[in-house]
């Protein structure tokens, strides 16, 4: 096939082009022609199609996401905010930490292992490009019903992919979630978070500044895997033919990535790059256009110099390929020799493919012929923006009118049955079968990980400075009330940080929704963004960046609105953290916070096939006071343990606490039914020595946080209002579910 050059595009203005097949709408295609004052070449068309895809351009979400800027929190800790590969915050002692969460949902449905593995690889490179050493990953996962055949198809592969890639990189997996729900059947959610650490002076940005500077591609060679991969896959829904799209899924090699990380960090240490960008979604199309757009001028690239695994690839395919483990750097000519030496030392393929110009266009040639001549900003940043119709779905009023009618335990036998049923429920059962496939302690700096409320890593071995990270989402609450659901997820993630004694510092997010072309879904999304922006402003936590994943649906059935919120916190000495559970008898157990009849969206309701009612209302002022209590309690060494209440309520929290160190508890509750299964937000169970009760009482009173004694620790049973459950029996119920389903 003849090369479609810029000259050919001018000479044959009416040549038919497959814009619709590439995901472009007629008006978008017309706009490209208007920008260029001609038809695009096939290479330009490929670039615009992937960069203007929903995944890359955020064309449906931009109008709402601007709230994060309009309601931005003034934070002295924020060093790099929204707009770069990842946000960066100051954590003290000269250290900066970067963190971000992304989605890799659609590829993981099609090819579970590689989809999940390359999701980890991509987010790690995002962190690396900021100049940071990646130090930990997390993975919030959501699947269809645990017993469904497709769940049994995708879950083992996804878990193996997350573990296989992360373990080979030598990065500890310190947290995440595993949730099962009918709405994720056929559309699992694979969200991946990475944390990196650096000195302030090490921060790198994605910009191609300085005419004459060189454009350098290094890392793996470019192959045919992932052509139009995540950028196209994530911009359409699945039908029954979904798995036939396997060739679009990228294939990762963690050993290449590991070498790439070390090579890059050595390059950064010697200050050899002006700007840097990883090649993730949209591949070279993205890297070159974003670097050029973020810089001071134009760029010239020789596409035929790109090292290929498959020499048969066309220019369009090279530009669209999303082959993994590749980076694009801007390097001053005076530093290129040393740059090449370091790449050679690490045996990393490296090629100079172009240079920065003082012009205004991104020009790409192939075998000397000009095939791309575009204003880079029009590709990278000035894509279509849609203010899509939105309307409150009919179901909102319907579910709000539903009366929650659930059996509640009263007698000892009923209490016992409820506790065992919740302990064994797939959403609450022990996830060790999954998390044991992840290396949680590699590098030796992991302080806590699953099943703790948050993951925590030490970042300085002398001072023991550390960071904690938690991710949370309650899609049931977001379904009932997306505005409150976002606030509640934010509050829970911040609370999970604080229970360990870390101070919440910043927020990232991964917003997973159905089709934006559905007005009901767009309303859910808009309300979620509004709730998160308002919530972050009220709590004083800057939003540093994140990800939007649309088109998560099979046919006409969308997933539950699932905003996964990540919060990062800092702790000055990880040795003083508050553990999740008690390990001795004779401690007193107290509940911080108030319990109401909050059954809507609860796990107990879910187990009874009820998804209606009114979601709780987030009281963020009270959450902030509770966080102050938790932080002060750690500082004053009041707590022997602290564990937040969320999914499964008090029943799930106490189950996890007694099983952690095999120390029982005796619990006495008023209104035992509601007390056990309610999921009222803003509550934490704390264990204190008798000598600390007065200090705890004073602290709770000072912040106007309700305090209720609920029991004591000790023995080999969990006793609740006369019900007696031996820990051996409770552990059996809690640990057997997942292995029976997937082992």
Image (tube, rainbow, N blue to C red):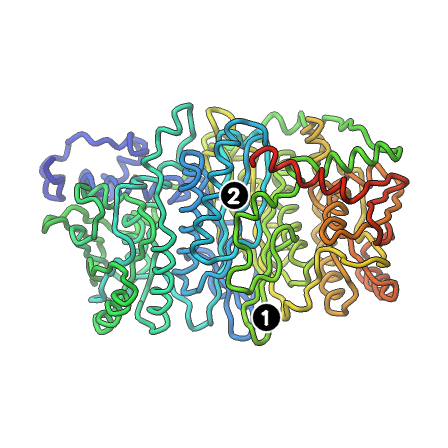
Label 1 environment density (alpha carbons within 10 Å; few <14, some 14–19, many ≥20): many
The answer to whether the residue labelled 2 contacts the one labelled 1, judged by CB atoms less than 8 Å apart, is no
What mark, if any, has residue 701 been given in the picture? none
Residue 529 percent location from the top left of the image: 55, 44
Label 2 environment density (alpha carbons within 10 Å; few <14, some 14–19, many ≥20): many
Foreground: 62 or 205?
Answer: 205
Mark 2 lies on a secondary structure that is strand
Q: Which of pointers 2 and 1 lies earlier in the amino acid sequence? A: 1
Q: Is residue 687 above or below residue 19?
A: below
Judge depth for marks 2 and 1 and give the one in front.
Answer: 1
Mark 1 lies on a secondary structure that is loop
Foreground: 544 or 178?
Answer: 178
Foreground: 409 or 43?
Answer: 409
**Residue labelled with disc 1:** 465
Q: Is residue 599 above or below residue 193?
A: above
Quadrant housing the N terminus: top left
Foreground: 495 or 419?
Answer: 419
The mark tally for this picture is: 2
Q: Residue at x 57, y 61 (%)?
A: 446
Q: Is residue 502 above or below residue 528?
A: below
Q: Quadrant of residue 180?
A: top right
- Is 294 left, or right, of 485 in this rendering? left
- Is 2 left, or right, of 210 in this rendering? left
Residue 354 percent location from the top left of the image: 19, 59
Of all residues, the one furthest to the front in this rendering is: 728
Quadrant housing the C terminus: top right
Residue 708 percent location from the top left of the image: 86, 52
What mark, if any, has residue 511 been given in the picture? 2
Measure the alpha-carbon separation of dots 2 and 1. Answer: 30 Å
- Is 205 left, or right, of 569 in this rendering? left
Residue 290 percent location from the top left of the image: 32, 54
């Amino acid at each position: 096939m003849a090369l479609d050059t810029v000259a050919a595009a001018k000479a044959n203005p009416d040549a038919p082009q497959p814009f619709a097949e590439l995901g472009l709408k007629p008006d978008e295609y017309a706009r490209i022609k208007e920008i260029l004052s001609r038809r695009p070449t096939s290479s330009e068309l490929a670039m615009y199609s992937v960069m203007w895809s929903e995944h890359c351009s955020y064309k449906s979400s931009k109008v709402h996401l601007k709230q994060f800027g309009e309601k931005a929190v003034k934070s002295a800790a924020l060093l790099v905010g929204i707009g770069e590969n990842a946000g960066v915050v100051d954590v003290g002692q000269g250290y900066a930490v970067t963190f971000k969460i992304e989605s890799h949902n659609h590829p993981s449905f099609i090819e579970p292992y590689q989809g999940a593995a390359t999701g980890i690889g991509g987010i790690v490179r995002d962190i690396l490009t900021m100049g940071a050493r990646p130090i930990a990953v997390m993975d919030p996962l959501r699947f269809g019903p645990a017993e469904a055949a497709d769940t049994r198809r995708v879950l083992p592969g996804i878990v193996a992919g997350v573990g296989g890639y992360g373990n080979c990189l030598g990065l500890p997996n310190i947290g995440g979630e595993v949730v099962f729900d009918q709405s994720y059947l056929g559309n699992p959610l694979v969200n991946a978070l990475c944390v990196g650490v650096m000195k302030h002076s090490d921060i790198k940005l994605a910009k191609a500044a300085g005419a004459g500077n060189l454009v350098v591609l290094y890392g793996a060679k470019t192959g045919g895997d992932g052509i139009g991969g995540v950028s196209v896959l994530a911009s359409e829904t699945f039908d029954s033919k979904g798995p036939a799209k396997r060739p679009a899924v990228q294939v990762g090699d963690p050993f290449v990535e590991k070498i790439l990380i070390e090579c890059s960090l050595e390059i950064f240490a010697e200050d050899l790059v002006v700007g840097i960008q990883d090649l993730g979604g949209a591949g070279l199309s993205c890297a070159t256009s974003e670097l050029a757009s973020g810089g001071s001028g134009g760029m010239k690239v020789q596409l035929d110099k790109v090292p290929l695994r498959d020499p048969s690839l066309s220019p369009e395919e090279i530009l669209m390929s999303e082959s993994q483990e590749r980076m694009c750097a801007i390097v001053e000519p005076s530093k290129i020799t040393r740059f090449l030496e370091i790449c050679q030392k690490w045996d990393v393929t490296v090629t100079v493919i172009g240079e920065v110009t003082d012009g205004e266009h991104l020009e790409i040639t192939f075998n000397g012929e000009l095939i791309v001549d575009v204003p880079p900003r029009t590709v990278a940043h000035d894509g279509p923006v849609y203010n899509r119709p939105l309307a409150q779905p009919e179901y909102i009023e319907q579910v709000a009118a539903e009366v929650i009618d659930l059996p509640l335990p009263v007698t000892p036998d009923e209490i016992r049955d409820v506790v065992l049923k919740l302990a064994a429920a797939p959403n609450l059962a022990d996830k060790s079968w999954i998390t044991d496939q992840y290396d949680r302690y590699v590098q030796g700096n992991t302080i806590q990980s699953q099943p703790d409320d948050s993951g925590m890593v030490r970042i300085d071995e002398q001072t023991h400075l550390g960071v904690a990270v938690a991710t949370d989402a309650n899609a049931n609450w977001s379904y009932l009330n997306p505005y409150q659901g976002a606030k509640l997820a934010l509050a829970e993630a911040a609370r999970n940080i604080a229970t360990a004694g870390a101070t919440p510092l910043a927020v990232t997010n991964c917003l997973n929704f159905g089709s934006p072309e559905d007005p009901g879904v767009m309303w859910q999304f808009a309300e979620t963004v509004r709730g998160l922006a308002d919530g972050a402003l009220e709590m004083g936590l800057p939003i540093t960046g994140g990800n939007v994943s649309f088109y998560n649906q099979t046919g006409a059935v969308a997933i539950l609105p699932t905003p996964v919120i990540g919060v990062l916190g800092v702790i000055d000495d990880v040795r003083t953290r508050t553990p999740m559970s008690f390990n001795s008898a004779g401690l007193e157990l107290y509940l911080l916070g108030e319990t109401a009849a909050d059954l809507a969206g609860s796990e107990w309701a879910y187990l009874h096939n009820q998804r209606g009612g009114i979601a709780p209302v987030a009281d963020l002022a009270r959450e902030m006071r509770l966080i102050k209590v938790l932080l002060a309690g750690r500082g004053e060494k009041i707590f022997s343990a602290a564990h937040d209440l969320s999914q499964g309520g008090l029943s799930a929290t106490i189950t996890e606490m007694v099983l952690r160190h095999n120390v029982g508890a005796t619990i006495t509750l008023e209104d035992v039914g509601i007390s056990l299964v309610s999921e009222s937000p803003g509550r934490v169970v704390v264990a204190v020595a008798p000598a600390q009760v007065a200090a705890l009482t004073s602290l709770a009173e000072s912040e106007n946080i309700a305090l209720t004694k609920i029991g004591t620790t000790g023995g080999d049973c969990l006793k609740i209002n006369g019900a007696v459950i031996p820990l051996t029996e409770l552990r059996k119920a809690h640990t057997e579910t997942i292995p029976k389903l997937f082992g």
